[in-house]
Amino acid sequence: MSDSENPTSRRTRPTPPTSADVARLAGVSRATVSYVLNNAEAVRISEPTRRRVREAAEELGYVPHAAARSLRAGHTRIVLLPTSHVPAGPLYSHFLDELQWALRRLDYTVVQYGSLGLGGDEATRAWAELRPVAVISLGEITLSPQNVATLRRAGARAVITMGPRAVPGAHALVMDQAEVGARAAAHLVERGRHRIGVVVPREPGLELFSAPRLAGAESVPGARVRPLPMAYTEESAAALAARWGSLGLDAVFAYNDEYAMLLMRALQDAGLRIPGDVAVIGADDLLLGRLLRPRLSTVRIELPAGEWLAGLVDAAVRDPSEVGERRDLLAAVALPRDST
């Protein structure tokens, strides 16, 4: 006999506490419980009362019912954040951590969704099933205007895209990675280095960033650019360093600081002088690059604060018409050090 057919099983199954139980224990109304636990700002409730309600809820193990709360509000408080399926550096990881903390402080529930292997249509249908109030797409899945419309029909009041181009219908935060490559190549040209290798990572998924960075370097007047495929391994870096003499290059923009540090060590092991024989520049301004000798020149990428983006999400949820359609975000600045 199954649990559904067994009356004894039904009788012994614990019943979750309700807001009415919390109200009785705290000696307040159910409305007061709702105001306190939902952080309602429009109602003034004394701090002792708030404390009694929270202590009663904790004693009973009560948590608000998300579905019921969504019905009352007319929407969920879920902000859907598709997980990254490409390696994320410290700068990007810090930005995402800051964003999630800021959204939680604004009383949103951040749900990370694994979208590996999904195209735009499949991903948006899967996201829409969760009925998020907002979606922040970080650019790894290309959304169409139809995808944005699907999410809005499912209740998403804000669809925010972060990527190299704007998406009609979404609040587009445009992050032009070409600017990174252009700043790196321009710095090398200013130093008299015109024959520039640009490391293109072999790791899958990174072409979203590496392709525009390469294009940015190629756009700089006076730069003669050669793409250099390299995996993030000592063996791949050593193989590239071993044939450096045959490449006819006097500088390298190594995609980011991690690839730059790996390649610089391999070039030094091959007997090349940095920057005498080869000028090296990376991107991201990692602390470790400043500790190397020679210290690594880099391109510092200035991302927006996670708290700022959380505020933008909140403003769009409250009134989508208040937020502009496009904002250019990413700024890049070359930081000369000893390696160039």
Image (cartoon, rainbow, N blue to C red):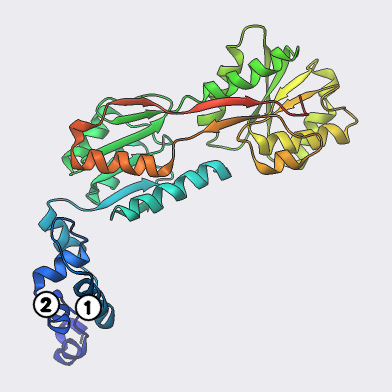
Q: What's under tag 1, amino acid-wise? A: Arg
Q: Answer with left or right where residue 218 lies relative to residue 27.
A: right
Q: Secondary structure at mark 1?
A: helix
The reply to whether the C-beta atoms of the residues labelled 2 and 1 are less than 8 Å apart is yes
**Residue at mark 2:** 28
Q: What's under tag 2, amino acid-wise? A: Val
Quarter occupied by the C terminus:
top right
Q: Residue at x 17, y 86 (%)?
A: 10
Badge 2, how many Cα within 10 Å: few under 14, some, many 20+? Answer: some
**Residue at mark 1:** 52
Q: Residue at x 73, y 33 (%)?
A: 296
Q: Earlier in the sequence, mark 2 or mark 1?
A: 2
Residue 136 vertical position relative to residue 241 in the rendered view, above or below: below
Q: Secondary structure at mark 2?
A: loop
Q: Is residue 123 visible?
A: no
Query: Could you say which quadrant of the image residue 190 lies in?
Result: top right
Q: Position of residue 180 (x, y in %)?
A: 57, 24
Residue 131 vertical position relative to residue 316 in the rendered view, above or below: below
